[in-house]
Image (cartoon, rainbow, N blue to C red):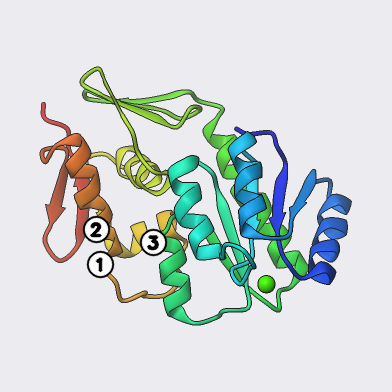
């Protein structure tokens, strides 16, 4: 998807040029934006393979960027790279749809590994086109969903969640498993974010596809 390379959104010139040089050396195509507003304008023109997003930015901060980019390009993958290391900021970013979160100061090797993981996941997804279960069809390349012949619009996170549940159809997916796989959490964020997203999916797809397994998690069970 995209093909626009990596968009580095960073207002600190030294970090921006370091990232740009380091990632180019790793073979990535890098473009830069020094504030949230110009990043959004660039995203309006084309999608990127990945957006690397600082949070404390002039003009329009990273949180607001996430909010607007989710409207603008719901399937855009965003990796947050920020000096903010508190759980609230992380949770907020994940709730706004960020795919991953790395804190500054960062270790370049770790950042590159995480970038590769994000890119691999979007590429792996594009090798098989459709995932069909019951009357739900996921188009894994276009990141769209059809339910009973109707096109349903989902955010990137909603799509990831539905995809995970569908790949494990008929099996119980524990909350922790969903938090780790869909949100990248390796800790308990202490929120009901999974429940909130399942509620959103049910709002769009109807109540009968995703079953609640009390105190455990959720199970995708299409009506027979
Ligand atoms: Ca900054």
Question: Distance of mark 2 from mark 3, alpha carbons?
Answer: 10 Å
Query: In the image, which is nearer the foreground, mark 1 or mark 3?
Result: 3
User: Answer yes or no: do the residues labelled 1 and 3 have beta carbons within 8 Å?
Assistant: no
Q: Which residue corresponds to the image point at 48% horizontal and 23% vertical from the top-left?
A: 129
Asked if the residues shown at circle 1 and circle 2 are in contact, with their CB atoms under 8 angstroms apart, the answer is: yes
The furthest residue to the top:
149
Q: Residue at x 70, y 37 (%)?
A: 4
Would you call the spot at circle 2 few (<14 residues within 10 Å), some (14-19), or many (20 or more)?
few
Residue 128's spot in the image, x, y percent?
50, 25
Q: CA distance from mark 1 to mark 3?
A: 10 Å
Question: Which residue position holds label 3?
Answer: 95
Q: Is residue 130 above or below residue 15?
A: above
Name the residue located 67 percent from the left edge and 60 percent from the top edge. 35
Q: Position of residue 93 (x, y in %)?
A: 46, 65
Q: Is residue 198 left or right of residue 117?
A: left
When asked about the image quadrant of residue 96, the answer is bottom left
Q: Pinpoint residue 84: horizontal percent, then vertical percent.
A: 57, 79
Residue 162, above or below 153: below
Q: Could one spot residue 180 in this view of the protein?
A: no
Q: Are marks 2 and 3 in contact (CB under 8 Å)?
A: yes
Image-based side of 29 in relation to 74, left or right: right
Q: Which residue is mark 2?
A: 196
Give the residue number, with chain letter if any, for mark 1.
192
Precedes in sequence: disc 1 or disc 3: 3
């Amino acid at each position: 998807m995209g093909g626009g390379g990596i968009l580095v959104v960073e207002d600190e010139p030294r970090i921006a040029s370091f990232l740009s040089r380091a990632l180019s050396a790793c073979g990535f195509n890098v473009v830069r934006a020094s504030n949230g507003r110009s990043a959004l304008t660039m995203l309006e023109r084309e999608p990127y393979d990945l957006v690397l997003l600082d949070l404390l930015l002039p003009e329009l901060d990273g949180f607001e960027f996430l909010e607007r980019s989710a409207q603008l390009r719901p399937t855009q993958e965003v990796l947050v790279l920020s000096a903010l290391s508190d759980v609230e900021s992380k949770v907020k970013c994940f709730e706004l749809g960020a795919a991953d979160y790395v804190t500054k100061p960062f270790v370049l090797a770790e950042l590159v590994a995480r970038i590769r993981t994000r890119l691999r996941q979007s590429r792996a997804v594009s090798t098989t086109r459709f995932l069909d279960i019951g009357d739900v069809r996921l188009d894994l390349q276009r990141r769209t969903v059809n339910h009973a012949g109707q096109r349903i619009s989902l955010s990137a996170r909603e799509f990831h969640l539905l995809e995970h549940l569908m790949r494990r159809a008929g099996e119980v997916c524990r909350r922790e498993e969903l938090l780790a796989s869909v949100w990248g959490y390796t800790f308990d964020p202490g929120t009901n974010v999974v429940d909130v997203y399942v509620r959103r999916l049910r709002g769009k797809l109807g109540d009968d596809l995703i079953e609640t397994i009390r105190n455990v998690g959720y199970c995708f069970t299409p009506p027979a």
